[in-house]
Amino acid sequence: MTRNENQAQFNQDEPSAHSGMRYWGKVEVVEEGENYRINRLEIKPKHRIKPQIHYHRSEHWVVVSGTAKVYCGDEERLLHRNESTYVPLATLHSVENPGFIPLILLEIQNGEYMGEDDTERPYDLTVAKLATEDK
């Protein structure tokens, strides 16, 4: 193997910058392509991911283990193992683990732009709205 092939193999084995620990648990990128990303999310008991909106990607969540309380738009529902939900573009969404065991989800993101700067949270939206109203 040449040095360049070795370096390419090493870079391929490195975890993505999107992987890692979060206040609510951890995320691991399973696979990534130009217009999609598959994540494994592990949400600690009694924790939640803050409400957020994405304008350039949709998400599909599949419960692998535990119970998920999903908020999507105006809907709230419980999902159990082997159940799933779809989060359309530009829809406020969140997920929480109401249970006592870790919630494990597979998250399939699909869209034209996968950057983390395509994530807005309600607080961010309120601040932006107030800033434009002041002008």
Image (cartoon, grey):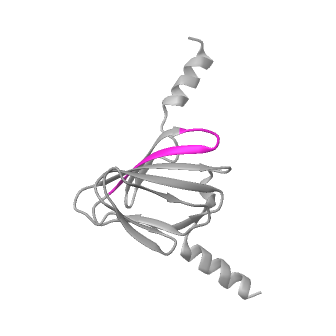
Is 90 positioned to the left or the right of 96 in the image?
right
User: Which residue is depicted at the point 50% across and 67% down?
Assistant: 93
Q: Looking at the figure, which quarter contains the C terminus? A: bottom right
Is 94 positioned to the left or the right of 6 in the image?
left
**Percent coordinates x, y for residue 62 in the rendering:** 41, 51
**Percent coordinates x, y for residue 57 in the rendering:** 61, 55
**Is residue 15 on the magenta stretch?**
no
Give the magenta-colored segment's residue range: 32-43
**Percent coordinates x, y for residue 86 in the rendering:** 50, 57
Q: Main secondary structure of the magenta part?
A: strand
Taking the view exactly as shown, the residue that stands out farthest to the bottom is 134
Taking the view exactly as shown, the residue that stands out farthest to the top is 1
Q: Looking at the figure, which quarter contains the N terminus? A: top right
Count of picture labels: 0
- 31 vs 134: above or below: above
- 12 vs 18: above or below: above
User: Which residue is depicted at the point 63% across and 59% down?
Assistant: 118
